[in-house]
Image (cartoon, rainbow, N blue to C red):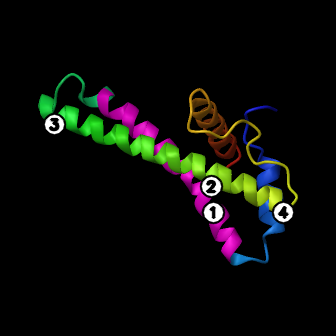
C-alpha cells in the first residue's frame, strides 16, 4: 500500500530491537510524535470551533490561533524527522520501510504523510484493548 504507515514493519522493527533498550526508546519517542502531531492538529481545529464566534477578545483569538498554528507546524516537522529516523532504523534492521511514501517537508508530501499517520492512529485505536 503506497503512502501508508506499515504496522507490520513497525512490529518487526520493535522485535528486532527487543534487546536494545536505547533503540526501543528511540522507537517509542518517534511513535509518540504521531500522537503529538495528532493532538496539535486537533487543538488547532477545536479552538476556532469553540471561540470563533466570541468568548475571547479578537486580539487574544488571533494570538492563540497563531500560537496553535506554530505548534502544529513544529509537531509536523518533528513527525517528518521521526518518520525518516524510523525508516533509517528499519533499513538498518533489514525491515521494510515504516512509511513507503516520500518523506519530505514539501507539499504535497507533508499532507500525504499526515494522512498516513492519522490512518495509523485510527488503526491503533480500532485495535485497542
Task: State the CA–CA distance, disc 4 to disc 2.
Answer: 17 Å
Tell me: residue 38, above or below residue 109.
below
> Which numbered tag is attached to residue 74?
none
- At horizontal 55% and vertical 53% (from top left) the residue drawn is 33
Task: State the CA–CA distance, disc 2 to disc 3.
Answer: 33 Å
What is the crowding at mark 4: few (fewer than 14 residues within 10 Å), some, or many (at least 20)? some
| Residue 84 appears in view | yes
Which one is in front, 14 or 46? Answer: 14
Please, what secondary structure does the residue beneath circle 4 have?
loop
Task: State the CA–CA distance, disc 4 to disc 3.
Answer: 49 Å
Residue at the farthest top position: 53
Q: Quadrant of residue 123?
A: top right
What is the crowding at mark 3: few (fewer than 14 residues within 10 Å), some, or many (at least 20)? few
Q: Nearer the viewer, mark 1 or mark 4?
A: 4
Do the CB atoms of the residues marked 4 and 3 lie less than 8 Å apart? Answer: no
| Residue 129 appears in view | no
Do the CB atoms of the residues marked 1 and 2 lie less than 8 Å apart? Answer: yes
Residue stretch rendered in magenta on the structure: 22-48
Please, what secondary structure does the residue beneath circle 3 have?
helix
- At horizontal 13% and vertical 33% (from top left) the residue drawn is 59
The question of residue 82 being in magenta is answered with no
Task: State the CA–CA distance, disc 1 to disc 4.
Answer: 16 Å
Q: Position of residue 81 (x, y in %)?
A: 59, 51
Q: Earlier in the sequence, mark 2 or mark 3?
A: 2
**Residue indicated by mark 3:** 60
Q: Position of residue 73 (x, y in %)?
A: 43, 41
> Which numbered tag is attached to residue 31?
2
> Which numbered tag is attached to residue 93?
4
**Residue indicated by mark 1:** 28
Q: Nearer the viewer, mark 4 or mark 3?
A: 4
Do the CB atoms of the residues marked 1 and 4 lie less than 8 Å apart? Answer: no
Please, what secondary structure does the residue beneath circle 1 have?
helix
Amino acid at each position: 500500500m503506497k503512502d501508508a504507515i506499515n504496522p507490520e514493519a513497525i512490529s518487526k522493527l520493535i522485535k528486532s530491537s527487543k534487546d536494545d533498550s536505547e533503540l526501543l526508546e528511540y522507537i517509542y519517542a518517534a511513535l509518540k510524535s504521531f500522537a503529538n502531531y495528532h493532538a496539535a492538529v486537533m487543538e488547532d481545529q477545536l479552538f476556532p470551533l469553540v471561540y470563533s464566534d466570541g468568548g475571547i477578545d479578537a486580539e487574544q483569538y488571533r494570538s492563540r490561533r497563531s500560537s496553535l498554528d506554530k505548534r502544529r507546524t513544529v509537531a509536523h516537522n518533528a513527525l517528518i524527522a521521526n518518520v525518516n529516523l524510523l525508516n533509517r532504523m528499519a533499513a538498518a534492521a533489514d525491515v521494510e520501510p515504516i512509511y513507503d511514501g516520500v518523506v519530505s517537508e514539501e507539499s504535497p508530501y507533508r499532507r500525504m504523510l499526515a494522512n498516513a499517520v492519522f490512518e495509523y492512529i485510527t488503526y491503533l485505536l480500532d485495535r485497542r484493548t
